[in-house]
Image (tube, helix red, strand yellow):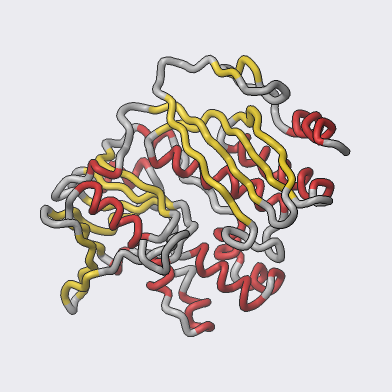
Amino acid sequence: MNELDWIRKIQSWVEAPAKGVAVGIGDDAAVLNPSEASLVLTTDSLVDGVHFDLAYSSPEDLGHKALAVNLSDIAAMGARPKYALVNLVLPPGKAENFLPGFYKGLSAEAQSAVTSIIGGNLSRCEKGLVICVTAVGEQVGAPRLRSGARPRDTIFLWGAVGHAAAGLQALQSLGLEEAKALFPTLVQAQLRPKACLSDAWLSLGVHASIDVSDGLVSELWHLARASSVGMELFPQNLDLTALQPLADESGAAALDWALYGGEDYALLFTAAAGKDEEIARALPGVRAIGRVHAGEPSVWISTEKGHQPLEARGFDHFGDTKA
């Protein structure tokens, strides 16, 4: 099939345009009739050999993941996802085996998140595979910025951390089938992460927010620098239950995965002290994991042995381990 044939196929695989989409897939560009809400835009890429390995990730997995990682950024801003554009760069001969499964996963994720796929692009490259998604959301209330953390805020974590990094280790050391059989939760976190989406989240009095894509400590440092505050982390409040069996088997440290592993797409945010119960009711599974302090930007953990500073370490495309 040629490019035009594939575009017609893609039109049949995604849902009809939602309200607010005047022109969807098939023209030179999409046309939106936005509401009075501010628009929030983000874009992210998945690159073969950097963000995924086709030995483990199916096309359907990648359809889910490509959209979820963008929806997570929309959520972190305190916005409701609405639309997405998808740009695929494929090697010769890849379309037939890749596109049907990819759009099956993408469409399922879009339906789950009430998000319309409104266009994109297909291109060819000589090798490798690149997936780029641009997501658009509608702002609900004021944007949740990294710069909004205040001294005496409580630091909250909604979602698991360390699972995706541990899942990747399981896949690499055990192979796809054995890893899925022994550590399904961890493998699922790596192959098909879910964005934290909830209307309840949008109505909470959040001061600052960021999604956990490059590692918990890395994101704490982003908040600390943007807000000019210190961030105290209580490691005993992190849930390491799902990580511990693989850590015991492999000799790794479960806490290191939780602190420095990326690609979990949990939400890290701060809110006024004393709101723990309200937030816990609104977001089942949320944990209070630390406290914001006045002072120079810094991140540390507090244990019975005292304070331990944490380096700004996490995934960085253009560095080593510093983020």
Q: Residue furthest left?
A: 295
Q: Position of residue 85 (x, y in %)?
A: 60, 33
Along the line of sight, which residue is nearer the eye, 285 or 232?
Answer: 232
Above or below, 81 relative to 264: above
- Please state, as top left, top right, bottom left or bottom right, where the N terminus lies in the image: top right
Q: Position of residue 159 (x, y in %)?
A: 43, 53
Above or below, 228 relative to 262: above
Side (left or right) of 265 relative to 85: left
Q: Position of residue 33 (x, y in %)?
A: 53, 15
Write down the quadrant of residue 32 in the picture.
Answer: top right
Q: Is residue 34 visible?
A: yes
- Please state, as top left, top right, bottom left or bottom right, where the C terminus lies in the image: bottom left
Residue at 55% x, 53% y is: 193
Residue at 65% x, 63% y is: 53
Residue at 23% x, 41% y is: 148
Along the line of sight, which residue is nearer the eye, 6 or 17?
Answer: 6
Q: Residue furthest front?
A: 126
Q: How many marks?
A: 0
